[in-house]
Amino acid sequence: MTATGRSAVELDGEWRFVPDTERLYRADDLPAGEPIHVPGCWESQVPRPYRIITAWYHRTVMVPEDWRGSRAVLRFGAVMYRCSVWVNGKQVGTHEGGYTAFAVDITDAVRWGAENSLAVEVQNPLNAIADYPALAVERVLSAEEYAPDLPLREAPHGKQTWYSSQSGIWQSVCLERTPTAYVSSLLVLPDVGASSATVRWSLEGVTERPALELAVIGPDGALVSTTVVEPEAGSASGETEVPVPDPVLWGLGRPNLYRLRARLTGGGGEPDDVSVRFGMREIATRDGVVTLNGEPVYLLGALDQDLYPDSISTPPSREYLDEQLARARELGFNILRCHIKVPDPAYLDAADEAGMLLWCELPNWSRFTAESGARGRATLRRMVETMGNHPSVVIWTIINEDWGTRLRYERRDRQWLRRTYDWLKRLDPTRLVVDNSACETSETPNFHVRSDLADFHVYFGPDNAVRWRNMIADFARRPDWLWSPHGDAEPHGDEPLVLSEFGGWGLPRLDRMLEHHGGREPWWFGTGHGYYRPSGLRRRFARFALDRIWADVDALADATQWHQFEALQYQIGELRRHESIGGYVVTELTDAYWEANGVLDPMRGRKVYHDRFDEINAPDTAVILAERRDLWAGETCEAELVLASYGADAPARGALEWRIDVDGAAADEGVVEVDSWPRHGVRQMGAISFRAPDVDQPTDAVLRVRAVDAAGAEITKNSVRLSVLPRLAAGAGRRRHVAVDDPGEIWGIAERLRRTGHDVVSLDDAELLVAAELTPAIVSYAERGGRVLCLVRSSSAVPADLELRRSVEVHLRRLPHAGWPGQRSPWEGDWVSNFNWILPGAFPELPFRAPLDFSYEEVAPDHVLLGYDPQRHRDEVAAGMFVGWIHQPAALTWGFAQGLGSIVLTTFRLVPESGPVATTMLEALVQRLAVDREGDSVTQDRVPLEVDR
């Protein structure tokens, strides 16, 4: 709220900071302390910032003599979490709640025309946690021991347990002079259909019957309407409807902002004059889509943790926020989901002025009780009161992922949630409300009870692409599991389906982070656990011998970013093919410290794919759904094309132009006419057929699609990378005599080998043995000089009691393990990404990818080989995997001597899979292991690879 008839002293800047964990000090006897900047949390400024719990801020402030006879009010944007305010040694107010604004009237404690001592005592028990993330509720409980009268498990605290606590005066402070009777709040709720707005107003200090003049000023500065209210004597609040004729609408990229000016007279003091900005806009749902001002809008969202590289929770500047929003628009986003944290007012102003939608959420607590439910509603009420004038805010979330509630098990929690939804819709009828932003869990999904959106979260990495495709297809059918199975859900049946969390990792460049932090590793490199702890990144890069694949750690980071892009391209493509899905939210806008899944890095720098991202993240997009990404040379292939269009200016007709490029030259091309362009929907354009180019070595090809209007002007474009392999795999050419051990013929190994031109013979006549699992007899065969290829497709393929030269353990990548925050195994890759690699030159017959991409989708392993040491076994492992910030090395192809012979284990899925990469890799392994019975001089005609169709 802007005051035009008041005056203020800004109190941002240097204060003094005094830690007081033992609570020994008094407001009138504080030591000098150390300088600290306000606004800003102490974790970002104090040398040893954790386990302080309680601290004091103090400074002096001159209160002008000419303020005498008025009120002096201290206004705090937010203080985390509980505080008491003292002026000249006198306690003048207290506040609980770390995310909401509050004011303290200090009139009776000030000395006019003199310096006044100002002290603020702050408590945040979560500062007792010094190792992040602290995901277990027990960690929160242990923090409460430092302030047993402040049970933060029952209070909104958000993700302070994930990244860092955020303690202290983290938003702006000012001392304001107000009249003795003044307007304390204004909330404007627009009604576009009625060409009006409802104004909720409240007054303080009124002793006589006042008059309140409400003037609406348009975006062009002209007076729109004036309404005079004469409240009843003693009335401190009320609602008034003001006309807004022919409203100029606020919308995406159209930041049309009105101003409401309130002038209070006759209340027992001098007049008061304040104003607030608002926008005329309408957000709603209709027939399964979100509408903005009556027009369907496809939600192109990014999750925003609202964290900053140096200041944690406090934005560095308004200019910084403007630049961040500019980057978000470059990437194609139209909505940001401010994740379980109340953003700074400057964030909201910047979004209003940029025409960017915001989805804001109540910070979560850890355990549901009557007290936490009451605190949650109180926080939501204050959020509506302080954020409700911002047209950018269009969605509220009450609960995220059932955090702090037990919806699956407790009827009480479901009832509270349903009633809170109803209460919030009455409190703010101008926004959509999500009850519980639901997700998959290790047991059964949590769900919705009553909600305006049917949203859900899914994290399946590229190695689980089939699971992603199937899950999204199921989600698109509006499944019953989105809603409570207990008979108490109240779906309307047309809530827009929104996938509100998904994504994967792309590591930020280390050189950028070091440059930003003066050559040192960022402070947050010491956070994160296990495979998501960044510290020691360069050391592990060297120890894992990854310099054989990437020139340095920054080249690796760039490669993981391209891997992230291609994963998002696939995931978004599967979402956009379904007309029933009304939007999505990528996790996330920026890397959040140890959580490296942002489409921007922690400093808001562009990742390598920045200029391409709007190809896949736009209202209009052409989706390429390739049948497969590995192709045989010369074969006829298919790809499905989908046109998804929510653009404002859809043409009546147009075309999809496609071509296959090899080194920039078209190997094949064509056009698909679009005689009826979809408007606010999806059109399945069918499959195109194209011929893969003839090549004699592994070759990259690019399938490109351009959507153009009838005049040939480009509307959108997209492209995917393909791998073309020669039908005669390089290095093949000898018919081998192969023994097979495949109990029950479960995997069809013998048939696969025959189809690739080899003879399946007895062990006595074999050049090598291909087995589905190792047994003592097979190990004995290797000991005597035999060559063994084990195609590992089960955890029992290498029994623990075998006497192998290497201690190998087979681990199912999706096997549950302890300590996960959303991922069942370090190697699963569904939340913290895994990155698979093959050494350059190890398989020259195959396309070189680092990390492996969708060309290797069919063979992506279900298992990993543990026991691999990157130093001792570096020359034995031709393919492997690491996770997150270069952790958890595992082998995917591991060969070692065993007695007089050798054993090669591979977890790549090479049987019964029969695509080009699977066939070529299997053939390469067979040829490398084979021992010619008559010596290497024996030659045979090269054998064409027979391809399963």
Image (cartoon, rainbow, N blue to C red):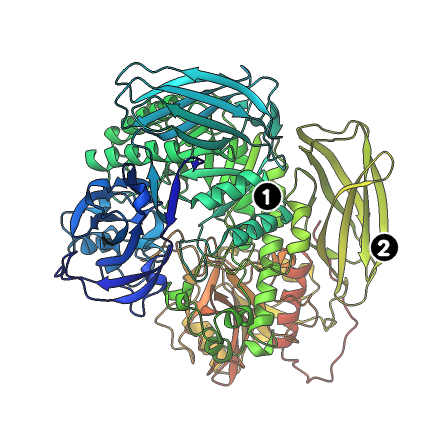
Callout 1 amino acid: Phe
Tell me the quarter of the picture where residue 30 sits.
bottom left
Please, is residue 48 above or below residue 58 in the view? below
Q: Is residue 536 left or right of residue 915?
A: left
Residue on which the image places disc 2: 667
Picture quarter with the N terminus: top left
Residue located at (24% from left, 67% from top): 33
> Percent position (x, y) of residue 183?
36, 29
Q: Residues within 10 Å of mark 2 (few under 14, many from 20)?
A: some
Secondary structure at numbered mark 2: strand
Mark earlier in primary sequence (2, 1):
1
Identify the element where label 1 is drawn. Answer: loop
10 Å neighbourhood of mark 1: few (<14), some, or many (≥20)? many
Q: In this rendering, would 241 be left or right of 86?
A: right
Q: Which residue sits at x=60%, y=59%?
A: 607
Name the front one of labels 2 and 1: 1
Query: Label for residue 333?
Result: 1
Is residue 334 at least partly visible in the picture? no
Where residue 668 appears, as percent x and y from the top left, is: 85, 51
- Foreground pick, 195 / 161: 195
Asked whether residue 814 is in view, the answer is: yes
Residue 695 falls left or right of residue 143: right
Image x and y of residue 275, in percent: 46, 32
Residue 726 vs residue 385, the one in the foreground: 385
Distance, label 2 to label 1, CA atoms, is 34 Å
